[in-house]
Image: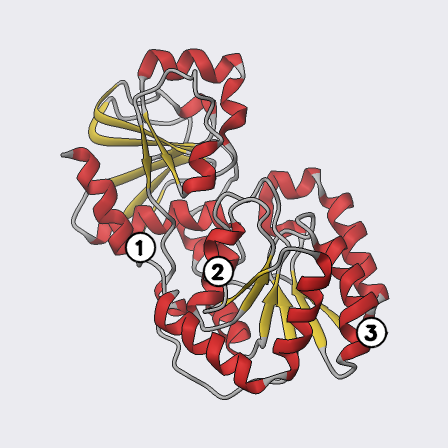
Amino acid sequence: MADDNVAFGSAIATGGPLGGAEIAFVALAEALAARGHSVEVRNGCEAALTHNGVRWVPLAHDMPHNGDLYIGNRGHRVIGLVRHAKRRLFWLHNPARYLRKPRNVWRLACYRPTLIVTGDYHAKTIPSWLVHGGCETIPYGVLDQFRTAQQREPPPPHAIFTSNPLRGLDWLLDLWARQIIPAVPEAELHIYAGPAVYGALGERRASDMEAVLARADALASRGVRRFAPVGRQALAGVLEGARVMLYRGDPGETFCLALAEAQAMGVPAIVTPLGAVGERVIDGVSGHVATSDEDFAATAIAVLRDDDLWRRWHRGALDHQRGLSWDMVATRFEALIR
C-alpha cells in the first residue's frame, strides 16, 4: 500500500485525530495484517516502524517490485509504483473528477488499476471516457469501538459536528443562531474540528478553517461550544453523550466517516442530500435527509425536544447503521486478489 499525501503512521491512528481517508488507510492495512497477510506501507512517515503487524517505511525507500495486491492511495504518483503486482488497485477518497488531469489519465491508461470507490455517488463522479481497469464499490468500515454501543436514555439537547469546518459549518452556524437556538434555548452545539486533523491540507486551509471556527467562538452565548479534535477512542465517548449530529454535507463528500461513526453509535443524524451524506442516513429510521433549510431546522428542533422521536431514531441507528467492520472490508479487498 502506498500514499503520498498526508504524513501519518499507524501509531497515530490509535491516539491523535486523523481525517477519514487516513483512518481508512490505516484501518485497512491493519485489518489485512490481522487476517494473516504480509502488509507493507510506503508513505510519508519519518522512519520505518512495525505496528499492529504492518510495516511502515518512508515512501522513497525500499519499494517492493512485486506482490499479490498493490493499493495505490488517491495520488497520481503512486498509481504504478509496484510494477509486478498480480492485482493493482487505485483507492479513491475524493470525487473522481480530478482524474481528468493528464498526469492521472496516462498513468491509469498505462497501468490499468481497478478503481475503488465508496458508494453510488462516488462512482458517478468517474469520467465515463476514462481508461482504467474497471471499478469496484467497497464502503469504508467503522472501527470496532463505534460498533458496540448499547441502547441508552435520551441525553441532554447537545448537538454535535465532527467534520471539516469548511464543509457546511458556516451554514449550520447561521441556521443554529437564526432558527434552532431560539426554539430550544437550552440546546448546545458541540464542535470537534480543526486543521490539525488534515495534515498538509489543513496547513494550507488553516486560515479559512480558523475563520469559520472564530464564528463559532463568537456564538458562545448562543450555546455553541468549540473543542479540539480528539482521537477515535475519545470520540466514541463524546458521541455517546450526543443527542443528534447536524451536518449539511458537501459535494466533495464521498462517504463521510464522521456520520457513519455517529450512526453506528446510535446518534440520530440530520443531513441534506449534498454529496454522499444522504447515503449515510436512513430517512425516517435513523434520522432525516432534509430537503430545505426550514426542513432541516424544524427536524433539528424536533429531535432536540422530543424524547420519543429520539428513541425511535436511536434504536433505528443501532439496529441498521452499525456499518461494516474493517475485517469485513478486508475480505472484499481479498476477493479482488482472486
- Depth order, front residue of 201/310: 310
| Label 3 to label 2: alpha-carbon separation | 28 Å
Residue that appears at 42% across and 54% down: 11
Q: Position of residue 91 (x, y in %)?
A: 39, 34
Q: Secondary structure at mark 2?
A: loop
Q: Residues within 10 Å of mark 3 (few under 14, many from 20)?
A: many
Where is residue 208, by image quadrant? top right
Q: What's the image's color scheme?
A: secondary structure
| Label 3 to label 1: alpha-carbon separation | 39 Å
Decide: is 275 above or below 143: above
> Is there CB contact under 8 Å for labels 3 and 2?
no
Q: Position of residue 156 (x, y in %)?
A: 63, 85
Asked whether, in this view, residue 168 is left or right of residue 92, the answer is right
Is residue 223 among what the camera can see? no
Residue that appears at 71% across and 55% down: 169
Mark 2 or 1: the one toward you: 2
Direction left: furthest residue: 338
Q: Which residue is mark 3?
A: 222
Q: Which residue is mark 1?
A: 326
